[in-house]
Amino acid sequence: LYVDHPLGEGQTVPLSREQAHYLFGVMRLGMGDGVALFNGRDGEWQAEVAEAGKRGGTLACTVQSAPLRLPPDLWLLFAPIKKTRTDFIVEKAAEMGAARILPVQTDHTNSERIRQDRLQAHAVEAAEQCGGTWVPEVADLTRLDRLLSDWPEDRQLMFCDEALAGGSSALPDAFAKTDPRPWAILIGPEGGFSEAERTRLAAMEQAHAVALGPRILRADTAAVAALTLWQRQLGD
Ligand code: SAM
């Protein structure tokens, strides 16, 4: 269970109404029962139910059961699409171990706004589901050109370009496991990238255009395919 509270020996953790409902109503836990907790900072801690009520309760930390496991330093940039598909991308990126998820507005992105708090909650749920001790940060919607104009010098960018679909599947040399530089993945919107964006990315030394196979994939499929390719090629 994710809690936004410090964890450590002797720590008492208060539960929100929703958490109490989940633990005592849905999971049917009672006094003294055990729960594994994480907060994204202190690793995983075992805790026992110390107080159980309908509207709240407390857990008492006992021992640390796993150290903090940081994800690889990978960012996922993607243009938000329909609500449920955007939720899917955030959930899968969190499961695959992306450290930062950055929704970006591109020339052909439809969506003007996102609910950052909702997407962050999806990332928390995904981290809970896959036993992580860390929660990726979901950033607010930012324009792609703004991000690119201040792009970190050493961060490599896997630019997933639909224009290359069906072309060579060879990966650029930068995809060598021995290269320690951090990476980001960029997935475009349903409308694809504009020629201006392609020209801009082609001029960036850090950007490497790749094809994700012979067919044009939907953006949510492309995100999962790119994360898998990155993990296979460069991940731990
Ligand atoms: N409207 C575009 C078109 O018809 O050419 C397709 C955009 S696609 C649905 C959404 C995003 O997924 C693309 O911008 C790209 O980042 C990624 N993508 C999909 N298929 C891909 C492929 N075969 N290779 C590389 N990227 C791909």
Image (tube, rainbow, N blue to C red):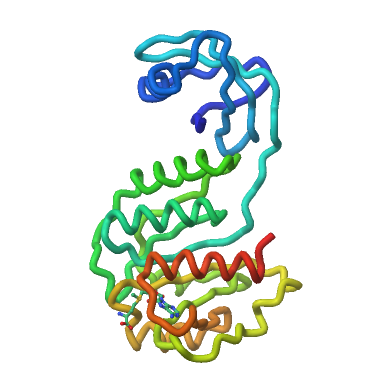
Q: Position of residue 156 (x, y in %)?
A: 59, 73
Q: Quadrant of residue 176?
A: bottom right
Q: In which quadrant of this rendering is ligand 1 seen?
A: bottom left
Q: Position of residue 201 (x, y in %)?
A: 46, 83
Q: Is residue 97 above or below residue 164?
A: above
Q: Quadrant of residue 179?
A: bottom right
Q: Is residue 85 left or right of residue 161?
A: left
Q: Is residue 87 above or below residue 174?
A: above
Q: Position of residue 135 (x, y in %)?
A: 53, 44
Quarter of the picture holding the C terminus: bottom right
Q: Residue furthest right?
A: 178
Q: How many marks overall?
A: 0
Residue at 62% x, 84% y: name it: 172
Residue at 40% x, 23% y: name it: 26
Residue at 38% x, 61% y: name it: 103
Q: Is residue 186 above or below residue 71?
A: below
Q: Residue furthest bottom?
A: 167
Q: Is residue 9 above or below residue 80?
A: above
Residue at 32% x, 62% y: name it: 80
Foreground: 26 or 13?
26
Q: Position of residue 226 (x, y in %)?
A: 51, 70
Q: Is residue 62 left or right of residue 206?
A: right
Q: Is residue 122 left or right of residue 184?
A: left
